[in-house]
Amino acid sequence: MQNIIFICFALYTIMLFIVMWFTSRKANNESFYVGNRQSPWFVVAYGMIGASLSGVTFLSVPGDVYTTQFTYFGIVIGYIIGYIVIAKILLPLYYRLNLTSIYTYLDQRFGFYSYKTGSFFFILSRLLGSSLRMYLMIYILQEFVFNHWNIPISVTASIFILIILLYTFRGGIKTVVWTDLLQTTFLLSALIITIVLISKELNFNIKELFQSMEDAGYTKTFHLAWRDHNFFVKQILSGAFITITMTGLDQDMMQKNLSCKSLKDAQRNMFTFSGILVFVNALFLILGGLLCVYAVHKGIDISSMKTDRIFPTIAIQYLPAFAAIVFILGLISAGYSSADGTLTALTTVICYDFLGLEKKDITIKQKTKIRHGVHIGVSILFLIIILIFSRFHNDALIRIIFNVASYTYGPLLGLYVFGMFTNRNVINDKIVPIIAIGSPIICFFLNKYSEVLFFGYHFGFELLLVNGLMTFIGLWLISIKSNHTNKLNKPNTI
């Protein structure tokens, strides 16, 4: 079985490089950063599904159903609200200002230090978040495939990072838009095929499948205990703001939108993408319920498993061999689609926001050489973080990633909300980094002692809102009201 899986992996990798060859011909720096602003919106919308889901959704969402039932769908409902905000408020601002790096807005609105602070928190957020997503794919493949050949995880991780580096090296976002198309197709195919295979194995019709999940208690969607981190109102609010920050204030996701031909196309992309994403997340929850029901019927003990291992264990060890192949290809697709865009986005932010390449009086050849060096450097950082995290993985990764996002994206949320919805100017831009770093520290202690301070209340993903609010209050305290209207405060005009 391992040999067949390896052959499928090799063929899939070859397909990626074929796509790379077609998309990177005559590629230049503009192709790498914004795809020459010629990406078809429907291709971007479809490909972003895979980039948003990643290996975390592919593994953690189905597995987490065992412990949290369908309560994750509250977050998915919140996604819809978040995508509307992005399409109607953030995208018009980015297109009106003709941004390549979205953090340039902070430079125009506040100044140098705010700009660097926003870029820094994106780099930190994405390095951690995407490395963890990539790690999950590598961890599963290591456990179920590469350990069979006694290949260490350091070699496995190096191979995958090298592949992503090579196929994004020349074309950048222009290549990523089209490889995401391929990867999303494999990911969704794996999801649907697995659901069909489990249904056949159980010999249940659709009604019987849903009835079995409901009888086992897995379909519970809304948690009504307000102190609990799964309280449905908190889930919806968290989903909305997770989307606004992790998509709308995220260079990786917005870079793909900014590669569209126009604002109208980018908005079409966002609305189409969000509708499909809600449906796909619902399918992942259904898959999770089916996996749990299948485990009961087949006498598989999943009570002591890490939730991230439930799906791969059943797919590889209990379902027909075809299911294992489909699962592995879907997992690889999910891992690639998350990491390739991030690698490109981090390279863009470092080149634009920290090195200021577009302002340097050097040749295009020199700029390209610097970009290549940054791209390689970011790849090495990815590898280091993956290897470090491989020693500490002991929880459902989707919760770890959202918890990390609560601390790292909060300052970005506060900065953008303050900049777009107030008419106040920051007095001392140099103090902004102190506020942005202080807010997550305060939130850490609030979260640690929340049950004592707030009558048993336990923070969930809504800690992101508290973090953003802390940053907003800090900015308010060091600001004064402007005597004239700033055009950067009008996000919904173009």
Image (cartoon, rainbow, N blue to C red):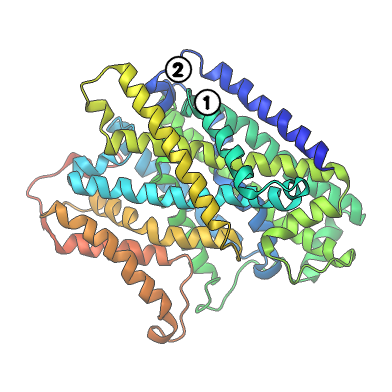
Measuring 48% from the left and 39% from the top, which residue is drawn there? 379
Compared to 358, does 387 lie above or below?
below
Tag 1: residue type?
Thr
- In the rendered structure, find residue 175 and report the number of the disc placed on it: 1
Work out which quarter of the rendered image holds the N terminus and state it. top right
Q: How many marks?
A: 2
Provide the secondary structure element on which disc 2 rests: loop
Q: Nearer the viewer, residue 210 or 308?
A: 308
- In the rendered structure, find residue 27 and report the number of the disc placed on it: 2
Other residues around mark 2 within 10 Å, as few (<14) / some (14–19) / many (≥20): some
Compared to 466, does 389 lie above or below?
above
Q: Nearer the viewer, residue 129 or 249?
A: 129
Give the image location of residue 275, x and y in percent.
57, 44
Provide the secondary structure element on which disc 1 rests: helix
212 horizontally vs 250: left or right: right
Give the image location of residue 181, x and y in percent.
61, 31
User: CA gap, disc 2 to disc 1?
Assistant: 9 Å
Measuring 6% from the left and 49% from the top, which residue is drawn there? 483
Decide if residue 9 is in sight here: yes
- Check if mark 2's residue and mark 1's residue have beta carbons within 8 Å: yes
Work out which quarter of the rendered image holds the C terminus and state it. top left
- In the rendered structure, find residue 197 and report the number of the disc placed on it: none
Give the image location of residue 212, x and y in percent.
83, 65
Other residues around mark 1 within 10 Å, as few (<14) / some (14–19) / many (≥20): many
343 horizontally vs 10: left or right: left
Compared to 25, does 414 lie above or below?
below
Measuring 40% from the left and 81% from the top, which residue is drawn there? 449
Give the image location of residue 165, x and y in percent.
52, 32
Tag 2: residue type?
Ala
- Mark 2 vs mark 1: which is more N-terminal? 2
Measuring 73% from the left and 48% from the top, which residue is drawn there? 150
